[in-house]
Amino acid sequence: MRTPTTSTWERWTRWPLAGAALVFLVAYSLPILDPGMPGRWKALCATVVGLLWLVFIVDFVVRLVAADHRFRWAWRHAFDAAVLLLPALRPLQLVLLVKVLNRSASQGLRGRVGLYVGFGSGIVAYVAALAALQAERYAEGASITSFGDAMWWALTTMTTVGYGDTYPVTTSGRVVGALLMITRWRAAWPSARSCARRSPRCARRSSCWWSAARPGRTERPVPSSRDRAARHSVR
């Protein structure tokens, strides 16, 4: 359950964390996209990644301490804790990064569902392409050897087209592919639904995509201010 302290913390750290996540993504991406980068720049990127990772750990600890039922909250966020604290799971850092960006965007893009879905899907595709390229680039017999190949593979996998011209051959690359298949829309769908529900403008529109996506579900119409005033005067 969200407490006032948690809500205040998330409201104040929403955009700073989003900015930190984007800087983290840039620092993480550059050495992968440019393998020939000078050593001092690689060291700088690694330092930035490490410092921002500490920021994410602090955010996790604060939200844990502020939770009403800490054990239940920790159990629900066990994956986040494992990725943050276990070095063996560091390859999954980008998955946690997507969750941080989604949390910030779901609160900041209320009522802009289409924009949020596009943002979430784009981030998922980019992160998956980056992780696949890191795993596949130097593997024997790999078909994903450039960022263009990796992005094409991520898009065809997300859209279930699957041409088969690019595919992972390493264990790490296949794990990335499996995660992408399982979570391809999860990063955007539930939070976009929450975004739609939180928006009064979306709730009042009969053409709301979330209502249209669930045929057979009868939605109670939201009365307008004029209807509420008329009903109050009758009483």
Image (cartoon, rainbow, N blue to C red):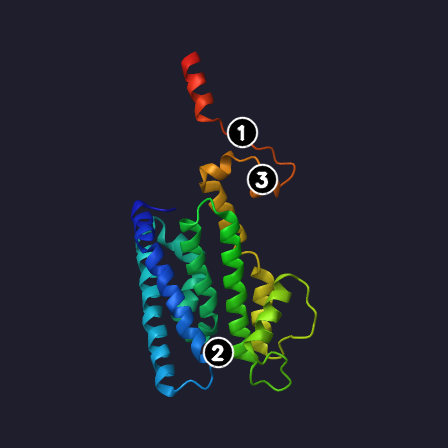
Q: Secondary structure at mark 1?
A: loop
* C-alpha distance separating marks 3 and 2: 41 Å
Residue 229 position, x and y percent, is 42, 20
What amino acid does circle 2 point to? Leu
Residue type at mark 3 is Ser
- Asked which quadrant contains residue 225, the reply is top left
Going 57% across and 65% down the picture, which residue do you hit? 180
Q: Earlier in the sequence, mark 3 or mark 2?
A: 2
Residue plotted at (61% across, 36% down): 217
Residue drawn at (56%, 70%) of the image: 176
Contact flag, marks 3 and 2 (Cβ < 8 Å): no
Q: Nearer the viewer, residue 212 or 62?
A: 212
Horizontal side of residue 155 vs 4, given as left or right: right
Q: Is disc 2 placed on a helix, strand or loop?
A: helix
Q: Secondary structure at mark 3?
A: helix
Marks 1 and 2, Cα distance to the nearest angstrom? Answer: 50 Å
Q: Position of residue 212 (x, y in %)?
A: 61, 40
Q: Is residue 235 visible?
A: no
Residue at image mark 1: 221
- Depicted 198 relative to depicted 234: above or below: below
Quadrant hosting residue 199: top left
- The residue type indicated by label 1 comes to Pro
> Mark 2 = which residue?
33
Would you name the residue on which mark 3 appears?
Answer: 211
